[in-house]
Structures are given as structure tokens and as C-alpha cells.
């Protein structure tokens, strides 16, 4: 029997419909499963998508944490800016007070230099020896001038660490007093015994307030008809050890009794 299809395309639709059957799809899937290269490519694509998803979520979480930290840091900076400014101002005031106290201490501790020197010279003076002149040969360094010079030069040391700057400030404050206590002086006198002059020099060197005693001139001269030795000594003051200085409180009575 001969069958005639009077509907164009009906055969193709039937063939297409038949091609999409479940059995054909399973057969195609089994063929794909047998291709290891295709399965490896599919696995790589799936793994890449999973990795990209993880990285995206992780980056979003990290970005959120950083944003929270940034907001907190900005708030803390705004909150403590006044405190930091006050701290810097207080440190500057403290450094200025340290320098001023060093100047005051240097002035106060050098008031009695000549009193000590005169006492040591008097105690070291041997018999038959007398002085005709005592003169200061150097100007005591000014603690205020030294501090000003140090401050003007310290502006170039801003690159140094804070600890180094603090150490330099302490050393400068300690050096102001030592510089102000260094005074050079000259002694001129006469003696009738050259051995007495030697004892005088040794006694001055043994003094905790005098150092670097040097005999610069020694001549025989006639004084009031007698031959004597005229000498000139140069020396320098020094800071004695702390245990050599004794201080006592000064009590002033307010009443008239």
C-alpha cells in the first residue's frame, strides 16, 4: 500500500520529535561521559566558577571589614585629635622648662665659685708666701647663650628619633652647668722660699675646686730691699664631687626677737 503525506513538513517534525527521545539523550550523555577530555574541561569550568565565587565573597567580606576599620579610625582620629595636640603642647612646655631649670641651676650653683676658690687658696698658702694679684683670665660661659646656640642648631635634627632628641636635651642640660662652672684664673705672688712655691702648687692641685695648676713665670726680684721670687700661676676651677658639698637649710626669723 502506498501512503501519501498530504501535510508538508510532517515527516520532518516526526523525525525531530523522535530524535529528542529519552533514550537518545541517555545515549548521547553516555558518549560524552566516555570522553575524558570533555569531562576534564567541564570539571575545570565548574571549579573555576566555584573559585571565582569564593574569591568574590571573600573580597566583599574583607572590603566590608576594612571599611568598618576605616570608619572607626576616622572617628578615633577626630575624637583624640585634641588630646594629641594637648600632649604635644605639654611636651614642648616640659622641654622648655627643663632648659630653663638648667639655666637657673647653673646660675645658682656658680654663685659661690669664687668663695670656694678663695678659701682653697687661703688654705693652701704656705708660710713666707703672699699673693699680689688674683685675676680671672676667661669669661664664664653663659648658660643662656649656650642653650640658645644649641636650640638654633637643633632645628636640623628633626629627622632623629624622639629618644635621640630627648637624650640630647638631657645631655645639653647637664653640660650647661659644667660649662658655667669652668673658670680660668691667674695668681701672682711672691715667696722667699722656692720650696714653699712647690708646696703651694701641690696644695692647689689637691683641692677639689681647683685643677690644671701651671707655673707660667718665676723670676727673682727685689722687694723692699729683699730678694724674693715672683711667680705667676694659672689654674682652672672644677666641679667637686657631690659628697664634698654640704648644704644646710637657711632659717630666717620673722620676728624681731
Image (tube, rainbow, N blue to C red):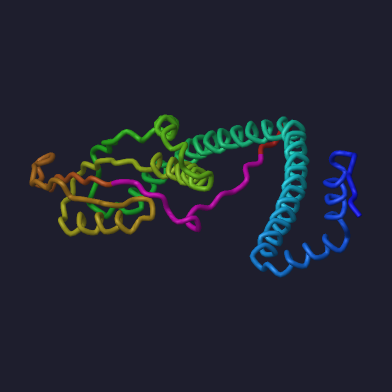
Residues in magenta, as a range: 236-251
- Which residue, as the protein is rendered here, is positioned at the far front? 1
Q: Quadrant of the N terminus?
A: bottom right
Question: Residue 29 placed where, x, y %?
Answer: 78, 63
Image-based side of 128 in relation to 27, left or right: left
Residue 242 within the segment the image draws in magenta: yes
Does residue 163 lie above or below 157 as drawn?
Answer: below
Q: Nearer the viewer, residue 186 or 173?
A: 173
Does residue 101 lie above or below 123 as drawn?
Answer: above
Question: Residue 250 placed where, x, y %?
Answer: 62, 42
Does residue 20 lie above or below 116 as drawn?
Answer: below
Is any atom of residue 198 visible in this view? yes
Residue 198 occupies which quadrant of the picture? Answer: bottom left
Q: Nearer the viewer, residue 102 or 181?
A: 102
Task: Tell me which residue sits at (37%, 49%) in the image.
Answer: 238
Question: Residue 58 placed where, x, y %?
Answer: 74, 51
Is any atom of residue 257 visible in this view? no
Task: Tell me which residue sits at (43%, 44%) in the image.
Answer: 175
Q: Quadrant of the C terminus?
A: top right
Question: Residue 211 placed where, x, y %?
Answer: 31, 52
Amino acid at each position: 500500500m502506498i501512503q501519501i503525506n498530504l501535510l508538508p513538513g510532517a515527516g520532518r517534525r516526526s523525525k525531530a520529535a523522535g530524535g529528542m527521545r529519552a533514550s537518545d539523550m541517555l545515549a548521547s550523555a553516555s558518549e560524552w561521559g566516555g570522553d575524558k577530555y570533555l569531562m576534564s574541561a567541564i570539571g575545570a569550568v565548574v571549579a573555576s566558577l566555584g573559585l571565582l565565587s569564593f574569591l568574590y565573597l571573600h573580597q566583599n567580606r574583607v572590603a566590608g571589614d576594612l571599611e568598618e576599620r576605616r570608619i572607626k579610625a576616622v572617628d578615633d582620629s577626630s575624637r583624640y585629635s585634641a588630646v594629641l595636640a594637648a600632649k604635644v603642647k605639654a611636651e614642648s612646655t616640659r622641654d622648655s622648662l627643663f632648659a630653663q631649670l638648667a639655666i637657673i641651676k647653673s646660675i645658682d650653683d656658680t654663685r659661690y665659685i669664687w668663695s670656694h676658690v678663695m678659701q682653697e687658696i687661703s688654705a693652701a698658702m704656705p708660710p713666707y708666701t703672699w699673693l699680689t694679684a688674683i685675676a680671672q683670665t676667661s669669661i664664664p660661659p653663659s648658660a643662656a647663650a649656650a642653650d640658645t646656640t644649641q636650640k638654633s642648631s637643633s632645628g636640623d635634627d628633626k629627622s632623629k628619633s624622639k629618644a635621640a632628641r630627648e637624650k640630647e636635651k638631657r645631655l645639653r642640660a647637664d653640660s650647661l652647668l659644667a660649662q658655667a662652672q669652668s673658670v680660668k684664673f691667674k695668681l701672682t705672688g711672691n715667696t722667699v722660699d722656692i720650696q714653699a712655691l712647690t708646696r703651694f702648687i701641690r696644695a692647689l692641685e689637691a683641692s677639689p675646686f681647683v685643677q690644671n695648676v701651671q707655673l707660667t713665670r718665676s723670676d727673682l726680684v727685689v722687694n723692699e730691699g729683699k730678694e724674693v721670687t715672683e711667680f705667676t700661676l694659672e689654674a682652672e676651677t672644677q666641679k667637686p664631687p657631690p659628697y664634698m658639698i654640704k648644704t644646710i637649710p637657711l632659717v630666717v626669723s620673722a620676728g624681731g626677737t
